[in-house]
Image: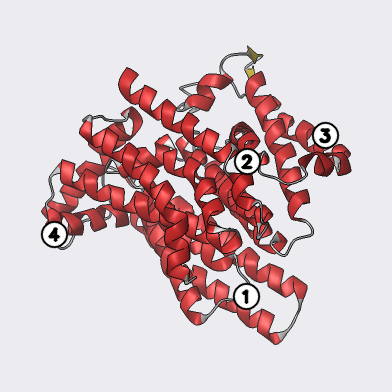
Amino acid sequence: MSAAAQVMRAAWAPVLILLILVTGVFVGEHLIASHAYDQNLFHIQVVRQFEMQWPVPDLSDYSAATGPLYHLVMVVLGGVFGNELETLRVLSALFGVAFVVIVSGVAARFTEARAAAFLTMPLAASIYVVASATHVHTDDFAWMASALCIGCVLFSKRSAKILVLASLAMFVAVAARQNFIWLAGPVLFAGLLDLGRERTVSAWRGLLALIAVVIPSLAVLITFVILWGGLVPPHFQEFHVSSGIDWIAAGYALGLLGLYAPFFLLAVPETAVLIRGKITMIVVAALAGMLFVLIPESAPDLAAGRTGGPLWTLSGLWVVADRSLPLACLSGFGAASLVIFGRALSATPARRSWAILVCALVASTVTQMANAQSFQRYFDTPTLLFLCWTLAMILGDRKDAVGRSSVGPAVLTVVLASLLVVRLVAF
């Protein structure tokens, strides 16, 4: 089977799920509150500003906290297909589709295409992916490029063409959302892993090539900082940039992982054996994960930016001394799940790729610790992406991969799609 055919076989089902949900949003003339707020107050205003200033838009300040590339792309697409808001919303769906295709295509490099399709379905049904695909919003655009960049460095064989593609993808992600400079973490870590395995001339050249991959994105970030006088345009420097470290970001990321992990753990072969073999490590990891939530204040708090998303609602159900006990339990389970996944991959050829993927998840989470806002949408997409590719690596070429992946992820897909429908109908 050709690579293109394999990607199409893995992508058609999750893309279909995304398009069904996207169509439902458009046909019902729905708006998803948080994304509609960002669209109407920020992103569409920037698109209109750049349209009026075209072909020399002023990038020194504008009404969005993100990089300008997405808005510039929408101006160009609007000039070709029409710049009405509804047209631009439909065009945004293209980036959501491309994102899902890339994620399922990379998953199919590790496991059977149909298994990759099941593993990608929860991502396609995520309210945050659907919302960005149906509004003028930067998330799917940036994650499309990020998934492509990470996918390029997961594998040890990298041609000059792959490296150029990775560099371009990273540049697009950072130019659209400047905090995606975290991609430098997994890119450089991939080179360090190769160097740690064999200190040859080839390994050194590989590391230097990956450093070259990062340079254009670092250059555009530095340009933004000089142009804006900070990490975000002047309008937003008191809103998004934290005055300190947002310690709850790590606990929240683990908590979200713990919320979704059970659906994917159902696909892990011989889970009971894995748990018995590392029970002490699992318990220690769970306790450490709980401390990430119990040490800092973790109760939902609008003023502190701890808001926005179902997990924050769940976190507020049982609070003691400004600490969320449900979030602590989920964070502990998330940390324990990481140990189980690592154990399942420890003796497989994919363990190196998984180390890079873990680095990507850690890097994206660390970046959020500099953000004053801990909205769920900042954590949701990387978590589902991480779980999809992790399970694809674990299942590999097993004959029962499709059967194992068809239960938990499918149930989670139904849950997420149902939550989206309820939200659209009820709100």
Q: Earlier in the sequence, mark 2 or mark 3?
A: 2
- The residue labelled by disc 1 is 207
- Per the image, label 2 sits on a secondary structure element best described as helix
Q: Nearer the viewer, residue 244 or 38?
A: 38
Q: Earlier in the sequence, mark 2 or mark 4?
A: 4
- Per the image, label 3 sits on a secondary structure element best described as helix
- The residue labelled by disc 4 is 80
User: From mark 2 to mark 4, how far is it between C-alphas?
Assistant: 42 Å
> Crowding near pointer 4: few (<14 within 10 Å), some, many (20+)?
few
- The residue labelled by disc 2 is 264
Give the residue type that dot 2 points to. Phe
Q: Earlier in the sequence, mark 4 or mark 3?
A: 4
- Depth check, mark 3 against mark 1: the one in front is 3
Q: Is residue 86 left or right of residue 97?
A: left
> Crowding near pointer 3: few (<14 within 10 Å), some, many (20+)?
some
- The residue labelled by disc 3 is 283
- Depth check, mark 4 against mark 1: the one in front is 4
Q: Earlier in the sequence, mark 3 or mark 1?
A: 1
Q: Is residue 81 above or below residue 208?
A: above
User: From mark 3 to mark 1, how far is it between C-alphas?
Assistant: 36 Å
The residue drawn where x is 19% and y is 57% is: 77
- Depth check, mark 2 against mark 4: the one in front is 2
Q: Quadrant of the C terminus?
A: top left
Q: Nearer the viewer, residue 30 or 254?
A: 30
- Depth check, mark 2 against mark 3: the one in front is 2
Please give the count of numbered marks on the rendered protein.
4
Q: Is residue 73 above or below residue 30?
A: below
Q: Earlier in the sequence, mark 4 or mark 1?
A: 4
**Residue 279 percent across, percent down from the top left:** 86, 38
